């Protein structure tokens, strides 16, 4: 019962082979349909029904029969070329995948195409008993009978996929299969010994945890969940998909489970991705979601549609950890596709958050335990022209408390999603083998980190530019200044040239057209991100007061495409300002590495060898003959003067401003005084607001709890946070001075760009 086949595709069975048709039939109509099928295809077979106590006795008779599992597969009525449940079915309280018993006979008679007998691949009784001996830890005829029933259910479920489509690949009897296996029982026994508890008690507790975790899917629940949750995303965006990459993934999925690891910008991310995969007939992912989303109706319905609700923290709960590990191992072994969000939560800033490694460890453990030969990791980028929830996330950056999810929250979210606000783009990065990635990083000591960074780098490389991200990137580069439509076009034009030169996907042609640029500005005005003033000679646009964090959210989604160029600008400026050095190329490289180190908790960089190649490519874009000119500060100055636009101040200023706030507060602190993280971040918010009012910070977007937390992490990485002796004070001062020096160069680049801007605007 391993390989799925449909009834019409079954291989011929030799007449002399005795057959036991094991029928999963719940009604008299289903029994009649299966009985008729068995009489036609296997007239001499023994027909038994699931749960029949005579099954084991029949399998022990000595003639080694072939056990053939069968079931009636019910299909929804065909509409528009598809057979999915519709809203009308739900309103009528009917389940087209399992019609009411009184209706089944009429459906089978009037619409025979909706009812067919499906058979899974059979297995000889001797094969089943040998398999039972290898995998089961529970002796006895009752356990063997239960094992055969489980195998039959799984086999016929697999076979049904040929009829109903891959989107309905659903697991059955998961907890029962896990708890019945011998390796699992051995794990429980070892854990019980370690905890000093009876094995039976630990088994009971682990079973409870498994039932809490396991997604119990059904075709009706999948269709219902899709229909119920549709208002959260279907009206808000026109979804654009990288179809070519999907076809490559489909081929990979024939051999391995796919682990989808998307960026996380919105509550709607899993719904948008599920819609894309469903439309292209991919099996439904097992989506690992936080327990905060398990409220009614998402919790009860979602669990039956593939959502796995996991506790936010496990603590020292060894039993729960064992349950999670075993469930992960089961999903990997059965090649079910899995989805989770490596960042651990939605980004508050618009760019990727640092990865969380917990679930990745369980995935690696499944390979180490040889549950599967390999799995394929799939970076996924999901970006939106606009998001209704950005305002709330921006408020959280400046200290607002995150609201709790619940029924009222769900209703408010649905109301906010009623109007179309542009496109949602789903793109798939280069998929790669987890086992291969681990082998590449073997002996490094940071295998998981390298794998996670490769995923996040893959997401960044697949992320397209959006019209809102590029326009906010342009407008935030100038402080509280309004532009006419023509002036906005002039500011955006050289940025579009950079995008085009790098072959970054995005709306380049649209933003070069006046109507396309105007449409983007109007949408940002409607979203209260940009304000328009039309009381003068012609309309002008600028970032709306108090909305800098929202604008920065959209802008930050594009920064990773420009960060290498920003670093090159700063390195060139240092060469242009400094004294001649013996090896200017190596000096610039060391300077670039130092800046990279300052930014390592904000951006995901390639390994050093690749990073160096990327910087050389950026230098080639500045000036093809830079190698002949790099030794001369004057020539480096000319290279900078010749560039049509600068990005360092737009890309890095907010992060370095935030670092100055944190480093300044650490430097002013008594080194023997401990740092309470929450209190310190609140203190930085207050100081940041003061510095903004004094004009010592470039813009409000740098007053951010998220940015301060990353800066504090950087300081901790340099061992500058924990209390220490007097030399700690000097280390903190050097840290502050290093940031201020780089920030000084960023400000200089900003002034150069302001001068260039005046030339572009014709003033």
Image (cartoon, rainbow, N blue to C red):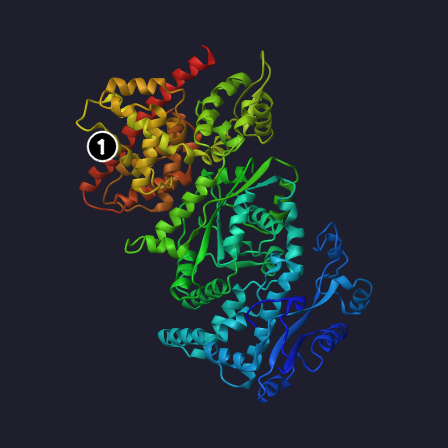
Left or right position of 757 against 156: left
Q: Nearer the viewer, residue 665 or 180?
A: 180
Q: Please state the total of marks drawn on the protein image.
A: 1
User: Looking at the image, which residue is at 65% across and 48% down?
Assistant: 230
Which quarter of the rendering shows the N terminus?
bottom right
Picture quarter containing residue 16?
Answer: bottom right
Which quarter of the rendering shows the C terminus?
top left
Indicate the position of residue 567 as horizontal and vertical percent values.
33, 31
Say whether residue 135 is visible. Answer: yes
Say whether residue 289 is visible. Answer: no
Indicate the position of residue 145 as horizontal and vertical percent values.
57, 81
Left or right position of 185 against 28: left
Indicate the position of residue 451 as horizontal and vertical percent values.
38, 51
**Helix, strand, or loop for circle 1?**
helix
Q: Nearer the viewer, residue 596 or 366?
A: 366
Picture quarter containing residue 573?
Answer: top left
Q: Can you identify the residue that label 1 sits on?
A: 586
Tag 1: Cα neighbours inside 10 Å, few (<14), some, or many (≥20)? Answer: few
Picture quarter containing residue 595?
Answer: top left
Indicate the position of residue 546 as horizontal and vertical percent values.
50, 29
Note whether 740 is above or below 131 in the view shown. above
Note whether 724 is above or below 741 in the view shown. below
């Amino acid at each position: 019962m391993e390989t799925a086949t449909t009834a019409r595709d079954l291989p011929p069975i030799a007449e002399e082979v005795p057959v036991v048709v094991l029928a999963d039939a719940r009604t008299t109509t289903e029994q009649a349909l299966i009985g008729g099928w068995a009489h036609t295809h296997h007239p001499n077979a023994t027909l038994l029904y699931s749960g029949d106590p005579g099954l084991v006795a029949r399998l022990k008779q000595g003639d080694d029969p072939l056990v053939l599992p069968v079931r009636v597969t019910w299909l929804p009525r065909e509409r528009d070329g598809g057979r999915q449940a519709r809203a009308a079915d739900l309103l009528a309280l009917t389940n087209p995948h399992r019609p009411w018993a009184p209706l089944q006979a009429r459906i089978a008679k009037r619409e025979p195409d909706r009812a067919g007998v499906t058979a899974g691949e059979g297995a000889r009784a001797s094969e089943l008993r040998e398999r039972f001996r290898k995998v089961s830890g529970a002796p006895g005829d009752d356990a063997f009978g239960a094992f055969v029933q489980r195998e039959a259910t799984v086999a016929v479920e697999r076979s049904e996929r040929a009829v109903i489509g891959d989107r309905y690949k659903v697991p059955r009897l998961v907890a029962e299969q896990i708890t019945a296996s011998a390796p699992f029982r051995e794990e429980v026994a070892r854990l019980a010994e370690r905890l000093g508890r009876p094995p039976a008690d630990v088994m009971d507790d682990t079973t409870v945890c498994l039932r809490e975790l396991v997604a119990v899917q059904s075709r009706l629940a999948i269709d219902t969940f899709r229909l119920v949750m549709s208002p959260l995303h279907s009206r808000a965006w026109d979804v654009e998909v990288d179809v070519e990459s999907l076809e490559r993934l489909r081929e990979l999925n024939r051999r391995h489970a796919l682990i989808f690891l998307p960026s996380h910008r919105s509550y709607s991310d899993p719904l948008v991705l599920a819609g894309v995969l469903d439309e292209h007939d991919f099996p439904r992912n097992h989506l690992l979601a936080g327990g905060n989303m398990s409220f009614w109706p998402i919790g009860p319905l979602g669990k039956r549609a593939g959502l796995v609700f996991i506790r936010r923290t496990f603590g020292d709960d060894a039993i729960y950890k064992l349950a999670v590990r075993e469930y992960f191992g089961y999903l990997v072994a059965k090649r079910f596709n899995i989805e989770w969000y490596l960042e651990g939560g939605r980004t508050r800033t618009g760019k990727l958050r640092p990865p969380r490694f917990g679930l990745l460890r369980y995935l690696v453990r499944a390979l180490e335990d040889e549950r599967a030969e390999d799995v394929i990791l799939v970076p996924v980028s999901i970006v939106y022209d606009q998001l209704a929830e950005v305002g709330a996330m921006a408020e959280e950056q400046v200290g607002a408390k995150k609201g709790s999810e619940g029924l009222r929250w769900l209703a408010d979210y649905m109301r906010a999603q009623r109007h179309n606000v542009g496109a949602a783009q789903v793109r798939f990065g280069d998929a790669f083998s987890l086992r291969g990635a681990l082998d590449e990083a073997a002996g490094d000591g940071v295998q998981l980190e390298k794998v996670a960074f490769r995923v996040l780098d893959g997401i960044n490389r697949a992320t397209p530019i959006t019209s809102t991200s590029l326009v906010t990137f342009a407008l935030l580069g100038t402080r509280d200044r309004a532009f006419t439509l023509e002036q906005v076009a002039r500011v955006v034009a050289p940025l579009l040239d950079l995008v085009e030169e790098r072959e970054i996907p995005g709306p380049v042609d649209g933003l070069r057209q006046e109507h396309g640029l105007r449409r983007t500005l109007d949408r940002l005005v409607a979203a209260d991100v940009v304000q328009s003033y039309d009381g003068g000679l012609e309309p002008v646009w600028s970032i709306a007061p108090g909305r800098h964090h929202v604008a920065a959210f959209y802008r930050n989604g594009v920064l990773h495409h420009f960060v290498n160029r920003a670093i090159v600008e700063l390195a060139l400026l240092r060469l242009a300002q400094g004294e001649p050095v013996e090896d200017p190329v190596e000096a610039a490289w060391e300077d670039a590495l130092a800046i990279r180190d300052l930014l390592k908790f904000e951006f995901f960089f390639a390994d050093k060898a690749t990073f160096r190649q990327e910087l050389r490519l950026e230098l080639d874009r500045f000036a093809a003959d830079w190698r002949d000119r790099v030794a001369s500060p004057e020539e480096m100055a000319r290279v900078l003067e010749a560039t049509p636009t600068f990005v360092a101040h737009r890309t890095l200023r907010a992060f370095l401003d935030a670092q100055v706030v944190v480093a300044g507060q650490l430097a002013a602190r008594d080194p023997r005084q401990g740092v309470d993280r929450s209190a310190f971040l609140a203190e930085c918010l207050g100081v940041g607001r003061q510095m903004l009012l004094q004009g010592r910070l470039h813009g409000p977007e740098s007053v951010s709890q998220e940015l301060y937390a990353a800066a504090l992490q950087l300081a901790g990485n340099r061992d500058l946070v924990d209390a220490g002796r007097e030399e700690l004070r000097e280390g903190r001062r050097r840290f502050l001075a290093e940031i201020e020096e780089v920030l000084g160069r960023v400000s200089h680049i900003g002034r150069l760009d302001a001068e260039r801007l005046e030339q572009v605007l014709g003033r």
